[in-house]
Amino acid sequence: MTESLGELLVVATPIGNLGDLSPRALAALRDADVVYCEDTRHSRTLFSANGFAPKGRLLALHQHNEASQCEEVCQRVARGEVVVLISDAGTPGISDPGERVVAAVAQAGLRVSTVPGPSAVIGALSISGLPTERFCMEGFLPRKAGERSVLYDRLEREERTVVLYESPQRLAVTMGEMAGRFSNRRVAVVRELTKMHEEVLRGTLADVSALVSSREILGEIVIVLAGATVTQEVSPDTVRVALLDQFAHGASVRDAVTEVVAALGVVHRETYDLALALRKAAKGD
């Protein structure tokens, strides 16, 4: 059996500045047998900006039809076609469609390659001013408050730098929630990467939260959060004494927990549960 010469090329496209499209990516778009994209209208503009027409080679592949397109893409690669996969911006599969198709082609034993380039994750991380040697990507934050709370519980212990996506409409709420959990952690809010109004807001969560709540923030947003600082183990007795001291000075449960978490570097959820138990016990006396 003759080995197929086809391949799936995962091609990164600009996240803002069209000048970031590499010569190799441009050649891949020009020479591909077919180009799968999130939005054919958006991608047609990218072709037009670079002086050539797609000539009927653009096909839609988005979050709603990706699963059903996997077999078709595999068949094209198997019969020797060069298939390019792009998203509206950045690298396919990174909080964009593409993961399922790449997995399907790879599992079929067919060739998958990449034309690397723009990525909002790497771009924001690289200019955040925060540690970059070890990091993790959490994508878009959950919309439900309970699911976000579970995520924040994990982030309290996460020692790596964390990259998150958020919409401008939800940014102030998200920053306020995180500031309530770990106000002293450093953060960079990066917006409109590579575009005319690119901006980076750096500082502690408390400081940046106050800033974004005081002004309108527009555009594409990436949040880069510093990892948790490794601290010595704090005994439950120490946490209990600290909470009781806060209560003795008139602090509410919320304020007491905020102060103790910041001072001792302990986990918010566990400290909050202990504070509730102590307050309940005090009322029962």
Image (cartoon, rainbow, N blue to C red):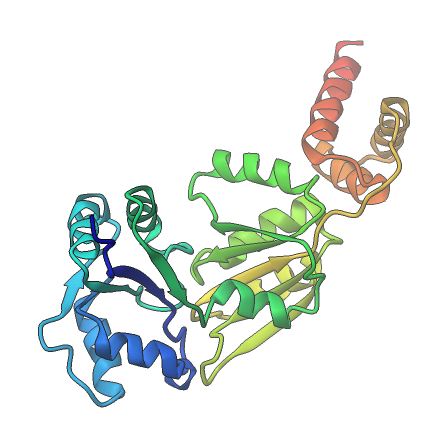
Instruction: Quarter of the image for the C terminus: give it.
Output: top right
Which residue is farthest left? 56
- Tell me if residue 214 can be seen: no
The residue that appears at 23% across and 56% down in the rendered structure is: 4
Q: Position of residue 219 (x, y in %)?
A: 43, 71
Front one among 60 and 267:
60
Image quarter of residue 104? top left
Q: Is residue 143 left or right of 110 when viewed as pictured? A: right
Of all residues shown, which one is farthest toward the bottom?
Answer: 51
Q: Nearer the viewer, residue 14 or 230?
A: 14
Tell me residue 163's x, y (percent).
57, 56
Q: Nearer the viewer, residue 213 or 251?
A: 213
Q: Residue 37: tell me if it is visible.
A: yes
- 210 lies left or right of 68: right
Q: What residue sits 44% from the left and 69% below the top?
A: 116
Q: With respect to residue 160, does 41 lie above or below?
A: below
User: 54 or 161: nearer the eye?
Assistant: 54
Please state if 153 lies on the left or on the right of 55 as rendered: right
